[in-house]
Amino acid sequence: MPTSHHAPSHVLDNAAWAALTGPHSRFAERVGRAARYPTDVSPFTALDDPTDPRAWDDLAALVGPGTVTPVTGVESVPDGWETEQSGDGVQLIDTALRAEPAPEAVRLGPADVPEILGLIALTRPGPFLPRTVELGTYLGIRDRGRLIALAGERLRPPGWTEISAVCTHPEHRGRGLATRLVRAVAAGIRERGDVPFLHAAAGNTDAIRLYESIGFTVRRRSRFVLVRAPVVRPDDARGLAVPGTGTRFSPYPGG
């Protein structure tokens, strides 16, 4: 079998693939060199090697003709694929975060999903789908029973866990709730021996400054593309929207 064209130098360079073939393998829908989460869990798809045309062939077989899907770590797409949207982000890793429990935080589960989705729709921290809560620990803070802040775990490559869905209701911002939840989620991540990391849109400078101020360090720039798979025949073209995200998609808050 031919060797891969390119081997990432670090597990976080292809975090979604590392998660889907590692700690999150139970979620993986896979065809050869391509994998994805179930479409009600997460919109992420991943390639073993984004420079390998065979991986793109496997992705086309996995998602189906004409389907729109996000892929990370891609510099260019092969002939027949169309780029619908692209965006740049930054990946930050925990280098000096003070991780600590938040006594007021509550663990969120499937019963909380409708309320979570309402807060996500209001604050737009990135995609959250009906089963995203199954990916890891999600913590929330309530005020008089209403969910007002949220943070949790998304991608989980070996040795690392991504903090995601960090958001606060607009009426309750400025109180440090999101920071407390990030510290609390990070405490749970560290307890099992993983290192926290997260992503932010490159243009979301306020969020990047906040994360840097509490102990995260920018590791690298990252890029995602929203691509449309080749259409085999005109009558097979049924372009599908990414579930739950409308016509636009960004895995990054503020993107």
Image (cartoon, grey):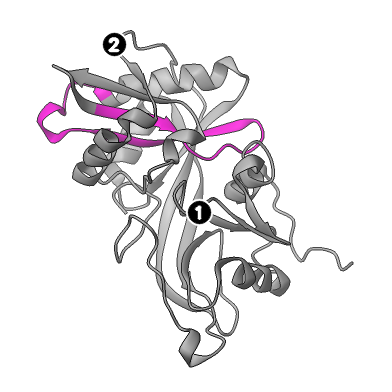
**Residue pictured at 47% horizontal, 46% vertical:** 41
Q: Which residue is label 1 attached to?
A: 44
Secondary structure at numbered mark 1? loop
Residue 170 lies in magenta, yes or no? yes
Against 186, residue 40 (above or below) is below
Q: Is residue 193 above or below residue 233?
A: above
Quarter of the image with the N terminus in it: bottom right
Which residue reaches farthest top?
Answer: 103
Q: Nearer the viewer, residue 255 or 144?
A: 144
- Residue 58, placed above or below residue 97: below
Q: For marks 2 and 1, give the CA distance.
A: 31 Å
Q: Residue 128 placed where, x, y %?
A: 36, 45
| Residue 240 covered by magenta stretch | no
Name the residue type under label 1.
Phe
Q: Which residue is mark 2?
A: 104
Q: Amino acid at mark 2?
A: Glu
Q: Quadrant of residue 194?
A: top right
What residue span does the magenta drawing correspond to? Answer: 149-177
Residue drawn at (59%, 46%) of the image:
15
